[in-house]
Image: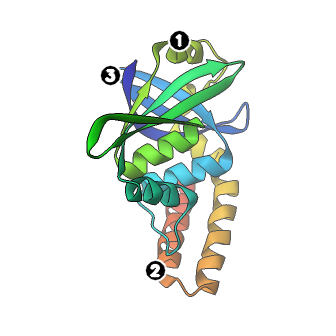
Amino acid sequence: MKQAKFLKVKYNPPSKSYAVHLSINSDKNVAIPVGTEAANTISMAYNGNSFPRPFTHDILLDIIHNLDFEISKVIISDIKNGTIFSKIVLNKHDHKNHELVIDCRPSDAIIVAIKSGATIFIEDHVMQKLDHSDIDVLTYTNSDNISNTSHELVENLYSALEKAIDNEEYEIAAKIRDQIKQIDKKLEE
């Protein structure tokens, strides 16, 4: 099992899907496929975007802390028939040997790790299988990523902007507007 660090979310044009890039020992990258909604949520978590109402992952973290547990780590634990499995490992604050393991999707594990500051681990056999898969996101540049995902991402951002304005959440609306401007600027380059 190796420690991994979140790098970025990237679009995979051939499959029209997203992948989370994790760095292993600074010399190896692994791509974990995720859905569009998870890709957006992971990006928002990494960028530290906050909203007036909690998202599902925020509720989960609040429950964990209120039950006096802490997240010790998340593990990308297995891959079977193309499905990747993950675990969130919890420890009771006052009993380090009281461990609780929760099965989850890799995208949920990564979001929880980002939001809680927990360490991400990936099992060696999962890395090997991903190395031999047809996920080819590592060969695309950021400009490819931006141009291929910009339409959908901007649509999602405009929807979020409209909702924030309707709810009179003007600080959030300003942040979303700034994200749209950043994408537009990168597209012009």
Residue 21: percent from the left, percent from the top? 49, 33
Residue 189 appears in the figure? no
Q: Is residue 26 above or below residue 143?
A: above
Residue 178 visible? The answer is yes
Q: Nearer the viewer, residue 155 or 119?
A: 119
Pointer 1 local density, CA inside 10 Å: few below 14, some 14–19, many at least 20: few
Which residue carries the number 2 mark? Answer: 171
Label annotation for residue 25: 3
Could you tell me how many numbered marks the image carries? Answer: 3
Query: In terms of secondary structure, where does tag 2 sit?
Result: helix
Residue drawn at x 59%, y 40% is: 144
* Callout 3 amino acid: Asn
Q: What residue sits 55% from the left and 44% below the top?
A: 108
Give the quadrant of the N terminus: top left
Say which amino acid is labelled 2: Glu
Task: Compute the Cα span from label 1 to label 2.
Answer: 44 Å
Q: 23 left or right of 141?
A: left
Measured in 3D between alpha carbons, the distance from the residue under mark 2 to the one under mark 3, in whole angstroms, is: 38 Å
Q: Position of residue 70 (x, y in %)?
A: 35, 46
Sequence-wise, the earlier of marks 3 and 1 is 3
Residue 99's image quarter?
top left
Camera-side mark, 1 or 2? 1
Instruction: Please tell me which residue lies in front, 109 or 19.
Output: 109
> Would you identify the image quadrant in which residue 159 lies?
bottom right
**Dot 3: element:** loop
